[in-house]
Every structure is written in structure tokens, then in C-alpha cells.
Image: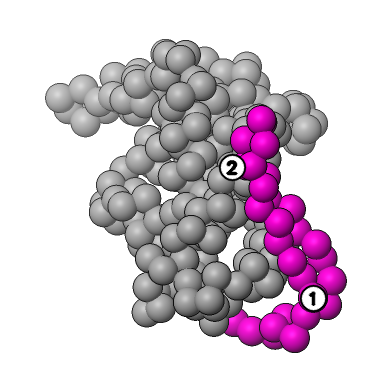
Amino acid sequence: MNTVSIKSNEHGINVNVDQSPTDLSKGSDESLVRLIAEFRSEEALALILDRYRERIYRTALKVTNNHNDAEDVVQEVSLTIYRKAHSFRTDSKFSTWLYRLVTNEAISRLRKIKRERTVSLDDYMPRFEDDGHHAERPVVDWSQEVEKKVAEKEIQSIIEKAMQELSPIDRTVVVLSEIEELTNPEIGKVLGLSVLAVKGRLHRARMFLRAKLAVQLGYQAG
């Protein structure tokens, strides 16, 4: 039977999962959360963490860009699931509730530990003259030449560095869209944003990342 030990020590609170077979292994996420809420079932919590720990860590890592912070997010979210299972509404998707817990914790942690200046994405949006023509030459469509210029690993490195310049909320929108493949309405539910706000943030963030990558590949606007 899976068990979860929740212990406090001088370094904080740790959640450890003992992975072993359980009769609840085929239960739905929603039914497991109900067991946690109603009976404080540590066995059900262990199963939830078995299923989602990797996803929680991956999302947290993409938002915080730090392995230790991502591990801390996993611990905090594990505790939050146990403590606040009663707040889960059974008429909604468990994954949406979980993403909300993860992103809230990751963004909160990022805002506390990050003090660097974030850029204004408006600076990377196209500008137009009164007649409708570009005030500056738009970023070149480099998509057909990327593989000729640099290796995929280098491109990823450029994008990851550029991601760190985004605000925590904009970075999270990109992660949920591009990495976790959530739809705009789903992202809106997770982050408490309107679909229009999600679209706007995502568009501006993509323009910013595109411009950053284009410059690194040798293209210059103007």
C-alpha cells in the first residue's frame, strides 16, 4: 500500500512517497481527491503524486528555471493538495485545479526570488506609419533557415535565456501553452485571466521571443 509521510524538520516540511501497489490504483483523480478531502487518505495522496509529480516538476522548472525551486514547488503543491483537497470542485477538471496550484506556487516563488528587471513586450511589437506601412522593417521570417544557422540545442538555449526576461505571468502563459499544450480557455481558468488576456499575453510573448531569436541568428530590424 502506498503511504505518504509528512514530516516537519529544521529545513521545513517534506513529503515522501512510499511507492507500492494499492487497491486504489485504478481510481479516478477526482475520486482520489475526494478520499483525501473526506478521509485524509495518505494512500490516495500518494497515488496522485505518483501520477503527477513529473508533470508538476516539469511545469515548475519551466517557470522558475531552477531545479531546487522546482523541487520546492513539488513539495509545497503536495502539501497543498493534502490540505486543500476540500476546495476542489468535482464539476471541474482535476488537471485545471492542479495547474492552478502549481503555477500559483511557482509564480509566487519566482516573484520572491527574482529581482531582475523584466522587459516591456510592447517594445517588440511591430510599429506602423500612418499609411499602414511598417515604421521599422519587421523581423525576417527565419524559419526556413534555422537549421542551417545553428543547432537545435543552441536555439533552445537562446529561447530559454529570453524566457527569463519575461514577467512571471507571461512566462507561465507560454509554458502552459507551448509545453503543456493547454488551450487558451484552459490557461485562462488556471491563471484567472480572460481568454482575450491570454491571447494578448501569448501573442506579445511570442513576438518578443521571435525577435530575440532572430537577432541572435543575425537578423536585424530597421
Q: Report the residue marked by disc 2.
A: 73
The picture places residue 76, in percent across and down from the top left corner, at: 56, 45
Q: Is residue 80 magenta?
A: no
- Count residues near mark 2 (Cα–Cα under 10 Å), then give few for <14, some for 14-19, many for 20+: many
Q: Helix or strand or loop: what does disc 1 sit on? A: loop
Q: Which region is colored magenta?
A: 1-28
The residues tagged by marks 2 and 1 sit, at their Cα atoms, a distance apart of 25 Å
Q: Helix or strand or loop: what does disc 2 sit on? A: helix
Mark earlier in primary sequence (2, 1): 1
The picture places residue 205, in percent across and down from the top left corner, at: 43, 35
The picture places residue 27, in percent across and down from the top left corner, at: 64, 84
Q: Report the residue marked by disc 1.
A: 1
| Residue 139 against residue 220 in the figure, above or below | below
Going by the numbered disc 1, the residue's amino acid type is Met
Going by the numbered disc 2, the residue's amino acid type is Val
Q: Is residue 23 magenta?
A: yes
Extreme residue in the left direction: 130
